[in-house]
Amino acid sequence: MFDGFWHVLGHRIWVVGALPAVNPGDRVVPYKVKLNRRMSWLCLLTFVQMVGCLQAVRAQTPRIAIITELSGPNAAIGDECRAGAEVAGRYLAPKTEPVELVYGDSQDEVRVAVSEFNRFAADPRVLAVVVSRSKTAIPLNPLSARSSIALFATAAHPALLSGNPIALRAYLNARVEGEFLARHAFRLGYKRIAMVTVEDEWNQSFSEAFQTELERLGGSIVLKESIQPSVVDMRSFVGRIRPLSPDAVFVNLQVSQAGPFIKRLREAGVTARLLSNYWVQKEDVTAAAGHAAVEGVLFGEVDSDSPKYLEMFRNDFPQARSTAAAYICYVAVAAAIETIGRIEGTLTRESVAQSVKEVQSIRLMDGNLKVIDREIQFPMRLYQLQQGKRSLAPASSLSANDDAG
């Protein structure tokens, strides 16, 4: 063993240093060795090759792929997701270890989402995939597990994490959402509720959890209807609700349906309080229903009022409004960045997949969010629409874990 340094002089290399003492008190022996020309060139060539390899590795910037609905009926949600993802990529990725965000358009179709995932899987630089919505996330589970590409899903379906040990939920479990809204409804005196749900993985699991919790507390579902995503004529459903005089109506529909349904409901004279999912605040819904029709609608949502995040979002997207969809994708990309950044050794899909299983918190601009059993723990708030805008509801102090009974 020796401790020294290399010195290039002319066409020769000198190795200069000192042999370390073996025992305390031993004399340190200096040395100076001149390599011959052949060995000098061989050493230089080796050094150049090592530098070239390091530069090549650094040139392969790791990629995080985001698959969301950039076109189709829910394209507005995809645009919001992309904006949130960009904020995370710009402000949370280490400057010394950057990541590149690449996008795929699921068109809100499972077949297209699978095709986009396979396209990214063929790119060795893609180390993680962020995907939005349960509808498209769950079918990607086996592909994620087989390819060792970690999946960060902004999906609520309770079955998301089963069967794929390298998936992480970057959203609320639908069970938490349903229980949260049911507890608030019961606490506010809405105990007899009519429920209309679109046939979608997230909406259905949300409604099931809502019904289970409401009935546990002593309430009842007086009407339970399922609507296919393609249905636009809501008159028959509205006609079945009015004679029941429910305390409230839970409108758990997609963006394109919620507005027309609420409008029909009010036109038919149904004055019951309305409950909904967080999509109800979107401009497409309020425009279709009318501001008066959606006045007072209650919905639960992830608490996204994070000052530093909002400041950066408004700085980068001054014409846009930060929504829950944007914030959730911001957190999902932050989780992928955090997971990749924890790796000290070789950066591979396998090492990222292993890191997913070990991550316990996600670093954000406004603090950390805990991760328990691969589920990010989001705080929730109860909101209502007033003059077409979201505001905190009177019972918003009830937390996601409080019991109304």
Image: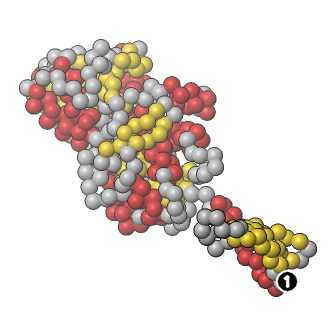
The amino acid type of the residue labelled 1 equals Arg
Q: How many marks?
A: 1
Name the foreground residue: 103 vs 183. 183
Task: Assess disc 1: are there few (<14), some (14-19) or many (≥20) residues with their C-alpha within 10 Å of its C-alpha.
Answer: few
Does 359 sit left or right of 216 as displayed?
right
The image shows residue 38 at horizontal and vertical percentages of 82, 85
User: Which residue is farthest left?
Assistant: 218
Residue 354 percent across, percent down from the top left: 40, 59
Residue 62 coordinates in the image, percent (x, y) = 57, 57
Could you tell whether 248 is left or right of 326 in the image?
left
Up the image or down, 363 lies above or below 2; here it is: above
251 left or right of 66?
left
- Quadrant where the C terminus lies? top left
**In the rendered image, which quarter is residue 279 located in?**
top left
The quadrant holding residue 245 is top left
Q: Is residue 222 visible?
A: no
- Quadrant position of the N terminus in the picture: bottom right
Q: Residue at x 47, y 27 (%)?
A: 306
Determine if residue 376 is in view. Answer: yes
Left-right relation of 60 to 283: right
Residue named by callout 1: 37
In the image, residue 208 above or below residue 99:
above
| Closer to us: 365 or 395 | 365
Q: Residue at x 25, y 46 (%)?
A: 158
Residue projecting furthest to the right: 10
Farthest residue to the front: give it: 25
What x and y, as percent, mark residue 347?
52, 61
Q: Secondary structure at mark 1?
A: helix
Q: Residue at x 43, y 42 (%)?
A: 362
Query: Nearest the camera: 102 or 359?
Result: 359
Q: Is residue 355 above or below residue 205?
A: below
